[in-house]
Image: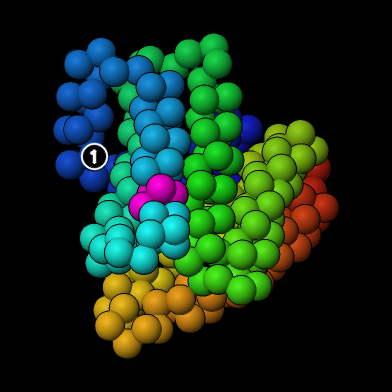
């Protein structure tokens, strides 16, 4: 998947009726794309605190925390959807829109991924921090590719939407296995898969940017 240098990811749900209706309402309410982008950090912070709460307080209800963590991740993705729709389709694109579109995602990734490592425990903590670093590197590689080829490469196998899908699935399974005590193992396995996928993503994007021909750039 590649896109022009405006850095807008292709999202299938952008063309759905429900997304269009909500984006129009947000535009009429005077909500700016930058405000929507910043909301993704808010949801990430809430999700982070929920997971950390289960680690530092054994009495914290894991069922509630895990389910709300899933809600926060999906809310983050909705923010990523609607900030672009309000900016482009709603005609509210600002001079600093590219910064607000990209920078909050780097913080949101870290806030969602790192606490999963603490839930997993053991060397899962290191895996969480490593995955957060690699997630930032995927964006760094994307921007290097944009500078070199004037195209943004959003390819996976562990792009942002894939990371959120993996964590969503992991916490659905983790919620179902809390009673058996396997939720920490599920988180550990998810982080291992994420790290392997992120390394593959970096290699894939590096290959794409280095093999894009001058004809494709034009």
Residue 200 visible in rendering: yes
Q: Is residue 40 left or right of residue 163?
A: left
In the image, residue 124 above or below residue 88:
below
Q: Quadrant of residue 127?
A: bottom right
Count of labels shown? 1
Relative image position of residue 213 (x, y in whole percent):
79, 48
- Please say whether residue 50 is one of the residues in the magenta stretch: yes
Residue 11 visible in rendering: no
Q: Residue at x 42, y 43 (%)?
A: 44
Relative image position of residue 173 (x, y in whole percent):
34, 77
Q: What colour scheme was applied to this rendering of the protein?
A: rainbow
Q: Residue at x 55, y 39 (%)?
A: 107
Relative image position of residue 138 (x, y in whole percent):
67, 51
Q: Residue at x 26, y 63 (%)?
A: 61
Residues drawn in magenta: 47-51
Q: Quadrant of the C terminus?
A: top right
Quick one: label 1, few (<14), some, or many (20+) residues within 10 Å? some
> Could you tell me which secondary element the residue under label 1 belongs to?
helix
Q: Quadrant of residue 130?
A: bottom right
In the image, residue 55 above or below residue 20:
below
Nearest the viewer among 82 and 56 is: 56
- Please say whether residue 204 is one of the residues in the magenta stretch: no
Q: Main secondary structure of the magenta part?
A: helix
Nearest the viewer among 203 and 136 is: 136
Q: Is residue 39 left or right of residue 25?
A: right
Relative image position of residue 188 (x, y in whole percent):
54, 75
Give the residue at mark 1: 19
Nearest the viewer among 3 and 158 is: 158
In the image, residue 135 above or below residue 169:
above
Nearest the viewer among 190 and 16 is: 190
Q: Residue at x 43, y 28 (%)?
A: 38
């Amino acid at each position: 998947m590649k896109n022009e240098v405006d850095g807008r990811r292709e999202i299938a749900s952008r063309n759905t009726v429900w997304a269009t209706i909500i984006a129009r309402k947000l535009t009429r309410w005077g909500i700016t794309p930058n405000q929507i982008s910043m909301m993704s950090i808010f949801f990430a912070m809430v999700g982070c605190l929920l997971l950390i709460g289960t680690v530092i307080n054994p009495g914290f209800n894991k069922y509630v925390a895990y389910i709300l963590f899933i809600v926060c991740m999906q809310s983050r993705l909705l923010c990523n959807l609607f900030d672009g729709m309000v900016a482009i389709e709603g005609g509210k694109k600002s001079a600093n829109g590219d910064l607000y579109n990209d920078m909050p995602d780097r913080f949101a990734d870290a806030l969602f991924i790192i606490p999963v490592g603490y839930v997993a425990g053991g060397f899962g903590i290191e895996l969480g921090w490593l995955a957060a670093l690699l997630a930032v590197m995927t964006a760094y590689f994307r921007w290097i590719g944009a500078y070199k080829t004037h195209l943004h490469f959003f390819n996976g196998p562990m792009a942002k939407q894939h990371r959120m899908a993996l964590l969503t699935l992991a916490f659905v399974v983790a919620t179902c296995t809390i009673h058996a005590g396997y939720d920490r193992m599920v988180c550990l396995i998810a982080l291992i898969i994420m790290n392997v996928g992120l390394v593959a993503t970096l290699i894939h994007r590096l290959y794409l940017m280095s093999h894009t021909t001058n004809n494709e750039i034009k």
